[in-house]
Amino acid sequence: MNSYRILVSSILLASSLGVVAAPLVSDPQNCGPMGARGENWEHRAGNIEMHHQKLHAALKLMPDQEGAWKKLMDSEPARAKVAPGKSEDWSKLTTPERADKMLERMKEHQAQQTEHVAALKEFYAVLTPEQKKTFDEFHSTPRAGMRGKQQNRSSSSAIAPTKP
């Protein structure tokens, strides 16, 4: 009688696991290099674009400042457009070759960021003091989702952490 209960419970457990796992097996997620990540990048690019539009509207730029704004937007690192190398290319490389490729990519990213910072400084120089204040306020808090709730960094540093 006891072995019968164990057999029945084992069969029920196995069948319930089969029911739960069936959707995963029948419709596997696309885990390729740009599978679900590609959609996330598109969503993120849309959020960045919306941020830029809000910032542009809040700054109330004058026509002579638009050129610097366009240069700043053009220098923005195009992370959504950068496609990683194919995984099979990387898998055929030796570890030192992969390390060299990663170093090469880091240098490219650093060059892009250097251009962006130069354009940012050029844009910031043509802003009025009121526009600089608005620009600084737009960038004084962490982006949503990066560090939890948005809060002013200066006020967050003033709050001492509590010990349990």
Image (spheres, grey):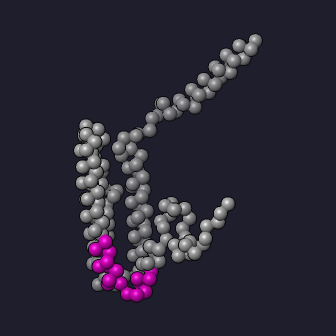
Q: What stretch is highlighted in magenta?
A: 117-134
Answer whether residue 107 is visible to the viewer in this image: yes
- Where residue 103 appears, as percent x and y from the top left, is 27, 53
Report the quarter where the N terminus lies: top right
Q: Can residue 74 be seen in this view?
A: no
Please identify the residue farthest to the right as the structure is shown: 1
Q: Position of residue 146 (x, y in %)?
A: 49, 61
- Which residue does the image show at 47% across and 74% down from the upper left? 140
Q: Does the magenta stretch include residue 58?
A: no
- In this figure, what is the number of numbered marks? 0
Majority SS type along the magenta span = helix
Q: Looking at the image, which residue sits at the far top? A: 1
Farthest residue toward the front? 163
Q: In this view, does 72 lie to the left or right of 19?
A: left
Q: Which of 125 and 28 is in front in this view?
A: 125
Between 15 and 105, the one nearer to me in the picture = 105
User: Is 124 inside the magenta-drawn segment?
Assistant: yes
**Where does the C terminus fall, quadrant-wise?**
bottom right
From the viewer's perspective, tell me whether residue 25 is left or right of residue 118: right
